[in-house]
Amino acid sequence: MEENIKQHFRPDEAAFIDQVRDWISTVIGQYRPVLTFFLNPRQRYIAQTMVNREIDVKVQSNGGWDGAEMQRLLFYPSYYEPTAKDFELEVLEVNYPTKFIELHHRQIMGTLIGEGLERNAFGDILGDEGRWQVVVTSAMAKYLHTNINHIGRAKIKWEPVSDGDVLHPFEDWEEVATTITSLRLDSVVAAGFNYSRNRAKQLVESGNVRLNWEDVTRPDATVVEHDLISVRHAGRIRIDSDNGLTRKNKEKVVLSVVHA
């Protein structure tokens, strides 16, 4: 069955499919829930597709706030009833001298990655009018308190946030229904931001485009439903649906675009 599943996804997703299969097998074999690291929308789509093939396994997700892009999954036996505590999440606010220093999303992300953390080790970074919060695991919260007390030049403290005080940033996503010549990365970038194909190609090749939070420099990389594309200084594109081909063999897609 595993090989049949892999035929429906990209070759570079095979290792993740194997990981999901291991999680599902653990639930079935040990009759217990399995909690994952933070997963992006595309990974959660793959996991849900695989769970849908199972009778005795279910899955839920939680990213600390409604609309979270990065979320942990909980695989569990069908008889189990999950609660929010099962996801072992905390939200920490960055306490820093806002009168003297301005922090940005990229600085917080860069600090966490610079400490050697993988992107799946923490969830969304939430910002609103100078306030910044990070969704983390309970274990990671302890690590941050102990090991990270600066972001750039700013001396910081991590403050726990109650459920009622979690930021819910507003992003003005615009739906774009269009046709493109192919599901190449540069074609989608061009369509999303109304760029020329050549400009989009150069942006990808120069390292200004990320696909599902990973650096990609191949303009011909294939994108699929639930992929998230980030373009530096431009914004983000989400592939909401691929609706097949037109009579002229163009791809009919629905994108959501948010401008930086």
Image (cartoon, grey):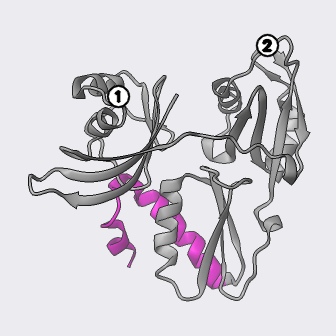
Between 44 and 177, the one lying in front of the other is: 177
Between 229 and 14, the one lying in front of the other is: 229
Q: Residues within 10 Å of mark 2 (few under 14, many from 20)?
A: few
Q: Residues within 10 Å of mark 1 (few under 14, many from 20)?
A: many
Residue for badge 2 = 153
Helix, strand or loop for the magenta stretch, by majority: helix
Q: Which residues are magenta?
A: 1-29
Q: Where does the image place residue 57, in percent across and percent down from the top left?
A: 60, 82
Q: Amino acid at mark 1?
A: Val
Proximity of marks 1 and 2: CB atoms separated by less than 8 Å: no
Return the mark for residue 49.
none
Between 67 and 46, the one lying in front of the other is: 67
Judge left or right: residue 166 versus residue 20. Answer: right
Q: Where does the image place residue 166, in percent across and percent down from the top left?
A: 80, 46
Residue for badge 1 = 204
**Looking at this rendering, what residue extends furthest in the top direction?**
100
Where 162 sits versus 20, above or below? Answer: above
Q: Where does the image place residue 195, in percent across and percent down from the top left?
A: 30, 27
Q: Where does the image place residue 219, in percent across and percent down from the top left?
A: 28, 34
Where 243 sits versus 49, above or below? Answer: above
Q: Which secondary structure lies at badge 1?
A: helix
Q: Amino acid at mark 2?
A: Arg
Quarter holding the N terminus is bottom left
Displayed quadrant of residue 73? bottom right
